[in-house]
Image: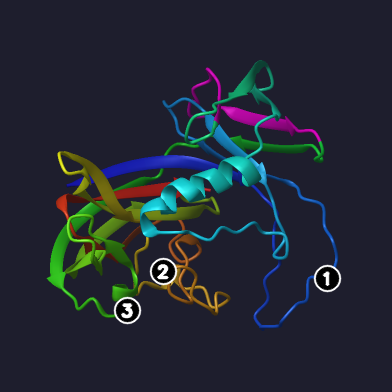
Amino acid sequence: MSKLNQFNVFILSLLAVLTSCEKEIEFSEKYDSGIAVYAIADPGQPFSMRISRSFTVNDNPSVVFSSYSKYYSELDTLYRTQIVITDAHVEVTVNGAEKYNMQYNSTNPYAYTCDYTPKVGDNISVHITAPGYKDVSASATIEQPKKVEILNTEVVYKDLGDDQAYVMTNPLTGRTEPFGEDSVMLLTLKMTDPAGEHNFYRLRVCSVAERTRVYFSDHTGTFYALTDVFTSDDIIFSDNMLTKPYGYWKEGFSNVFDDHLFNGQEYTFMVESRKPCGENQHVIVELQTI
């Protein structure tokens, strides 16, 4: 089962200058924390954003997980107590006229929300103030969603290999086991890029499966095994500046790319995602315009 979503995305963050050589840099100076903003403007869906603190390498908060079962709860506590900014004043201006004040939602996912629903062609300006931080602003125009199609799907055998490092604890047996099966899902995708524009994209391929967890001897519940890590041999995902793997992403691979190889054309490519263990296995494909 496949599901397609198309998003317009704008991200306000600190920019890092990347070079083609590798050099160790000592961060000895003290820098003030800033505001990092992540917002998705999806036509037809209520507008929301997350606002958090930015950190240097030396100041980055960390947490030691006492057990796998507490991973998500402890990570959630870290985010709420040390990362998320809850007292920001957020003003949204649409097309230079309509104004909305966003309110913080204290429940997960800790987003700021308002009554505004983006439409194609809208120009959105955001101004954010928060005690102890410099003001930040961002703007974006909501473009027509770019088209992406799933032309073909195929499941093929592939040894777990390095994927065995990605394990989960089976609550039924108490033993660790691989996240995925010994097979992968191959997707053939086609996107259509408009001519006369320099467009940037982010592709998300998320593999999902349902699992049953036993909480008590007489109570069970369903949880989801998922990953948005995928691979591809296509050149559009190649980035030689990424010289080291990050998380479960392999080195030299980026799911953010531009259209310089296919500007104004249709482009067909393949991606590969590990098939997760569980029931109701499916994949979600999102093409985001940055």
Above/below status of 61 relative to 94: below
Residue 20 magenta-highlighted: no
At which x and y percent is residue 227? Answer: 34, 57
* Cβ–Cβ under 8 Å for marks 2 and 3: no
Q: Residue at x 68, y 16 (%)?
A: 97
Q: Amino acid at mark 1?
A: Ser
Which residue bears the numbered disc 1? 28
How far is disc 1 from disc 3 in space, using C-alphas? 36 Å
Secondary structure under the numbered disc 1 in the rendered image: loop
Which residue bears the numbered disc 2? 248
Above/below status of 55 relative to 157: above
Q: Which residues are magenta?
A: 112-131
- For marks 2 and 3 on the same chain, the one whose residue lies earlier in the sequence: 3
Residue 115 magenta-highlighted: yes
Structural crowding at the residue carrying mark 1, measured as other residues with C-alpha within 10 Å and reported as few (<14), some (14–19) or many (≥20): few
Q: Amino acid at mark 3?
A: Asp
Residue 123, labelled with which disc?
none
Q: State the colouring used for the structure image.
A: rainbow
* Cβ–Cβ under 8 Å for marks 1 and 2: no
Q: Residue at x 21, y 62 (%)?
A: 275
85 vs 176, left or right, is right
At which x and y percent is residue 269? Answer: 31, 65
125 vs 196, left or right, is right
How far is disc 2 from disc 3 in space, using C-alphas? 10 Å
Residue 196 visible in the picture: yes
Which residue bears the numbered disc 3? 162
At which x and y percent is residue 15? Answer: 69, 58
- For marks 1 and 3 on the same chain, the one whose residue lies earlier in the sequence: 1
Secondary structure under the numbered disc 2 in the rendered image: loop
